[in-house]
Image (tube, rainbow, N blue to C red):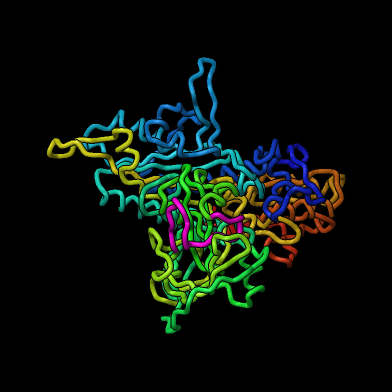
Amino acid sequence: MRLSKMYFRTLREIPSDAEIPSHQLLLRAGLIRKLASGIYGYMPMGYRVIRKIEQIIREEMNEKGAQELLMSAVQPAELWIESGRWSDFGPEMFRLKDRNEREFCLGPTHEEIFTDIVRDEVKSYKDLPINLYQIQTKYRDEKRPRFGLMRCREFIMKDAYSFDRDWEGLNRVYEDMYDAYTQIFKRCGLDFRAVEADTGAMGGSDSHEFTAMSEFGEGKIAYCENCSYGATVEKATCDSAIPEQHEASLELREIHTPNVKTIDELTKFLEIPGKKLLKTLIFSAKNELVAAVLLGHRELNIVKLVNALGVQEHELEFATEEDILQCTGAAVGFAGPIGLKNIKMLVDREVPLEKNTVIGANKTDYHIANVNYGRDFVGDHILDLRMVEEGDSCPLCGSGVKLARGIEVGQIFKLGTKYSEAMNGTYTDEGMKEKNIVMGCYGIGVSRTMAAIIEQHHDGDGIRWPLSVAPYHVMIAVVNVKDELQMEMGEKLYRELLSNQIEALLDDRDERAGVKFKDADLLGIPIRITIGKRASEGIVEFKLRKEKDKEELSYGHVISRITAILKEAGIQ
């Protein structure tokens, strides 16, 4: 492609609304164009990267026997009502009606659609297993779109759905998809970890998330350096690090704490550590009040709480001041587990292990000291409710876990019979007995993967694309396009590269050399060939984007040098 003919524009200044490197560079390099909050279009150079990622995905999915198709993004409400998710999915779903008042949604995911097409076709065990996938645009009405392609309302996704006779078959395809995803993200040049994850709105049992490591990632993972354990912080199991307590139980004592409402204020007022305080958080879940009790220095894990309650996250809200007053008799900030009225109480597993704690007195401006679980109050359930913290014990080996930020680029799920039972997806086995199809689903955020690659492959000058996903492999920069010899050499090299199936850009713009070099670095083209004053001697300048040094090379060696680099990278 000749750059003088290409539709693109680079920016020198960082856009004011771009917060993280990938968002800044996607806009500055002219790879995407913002249409509205959380909605972006892909410009020619950016769309080439998307197609490279898609091709890698196709190759690895096809290698595992998956078949590609394409379903509509517009989905009838009836299928979602049948599965039970029309109301469960929540406000992130874009809903619409046609002129006949029939309800539809813009697909946030496609479990219902794929289950529907398979149940209509599959009748016998001989028709299974099946693994179908598509690469398509998905829609989710994010409450706070941010970080460019990381959290947006319209995004490109590869989603696959497997259909098996039994769990043994599902386990096999799950391992195949795990292997395929590992290869996909390796080929995309990502440093990633596969960790246990919560199944969320998709449902099912086991799940693994593929997380690209990045300090700007919205997600966090917990992992152990001494064993294989890894999980998202929402999923990570928290084993208590509290040693056996030999402290004697003391008598309850009421303390006047005027206007001291928060844990931070209370630790300072009483001069005690947060672990000696209990916080009681009150929520409304489907119009039922529920209290979560945990040590003061711990953070509540909302995902664990909604899973314990069997509700969706959007169905859980903090209780109103009126509700809190009704069940505690006190203002907000003074709730405690003793004497709560008409409320279910869930208690974190660490709470019974700590002695002589301080709680809210359910009386405005008062707390109670020396509270002990079992003697003074008892919860309805004791379970793991807290968010994992760095140094917490690994559930496999007991070592201290580490925390790291990352970007979710893919996730795989064992759905089991969640959808086939709800939607009557059955087959007849060898004994003519009707059984439910066992399902799995497997997603990759294609557009998010592009952003994750940039997060891991950039410097102060711009993007540094891995060769496997670069929009073009080579940039030929002609320093002076008015110099006939330079231009003739540039044209000749351009044609030779194309004839050798090497993707090349010819920068034939009438611009200063500095502008061309800055654009080449910003765009992140892996190899740059500069044709300048030494063209008359048959000498060009050769530079790799990932390296600072450049070298002079005779024209006759350019093609072989580039071919060798591409071959080493598995491109040719």
Give above or below for 193 relative to 93: below
Residue under the image location 43 percent in, 58 percent down: 346
Q: Residue furthest top?
A: 100
Q: In the drawing, does residue 522 fall left or right of residue 228?
A: right
Residue nearest the viewer, comparing 101 with 217 = 101
Residue nearest the viewer, comparing 201 with 45 = 201
Q: In the drawing, does residue 434 fall left or right of residue 547?
A: left
Residue under the image location 63 percent in, 77 percent down: 271
Percent across and percent down for residue 450 are 60, 50
Q: Is residue 194 visible?
A: no
Residue nearest the viewer, comparing 40 with 368 = 368
Q: Is residue 342 magenta?
A: yes
Percent across and percent down for residue 232 are 49, 60
Main SS category, magenta section: loop
Give above or below for 424 relative to 404: above
Q: Is residue 198 magenta?
A: no
Give the extent of the magenta segment.
Answer: 329-347
Q: Is residue 385 visible?
A: yes
Could you say which quadrant of the image residue 407 lies in?
bottom right
Residue under the image location 54 percent in, 16 percent down: 99
Residue under the image location 21 percent in, 34 percent down: 124
Residue nearest the viewer, comparing 338 with 275 = 338
Give above or below for 92 relative to 269: above
Percent across and percent down for residue 303 are 48, 54
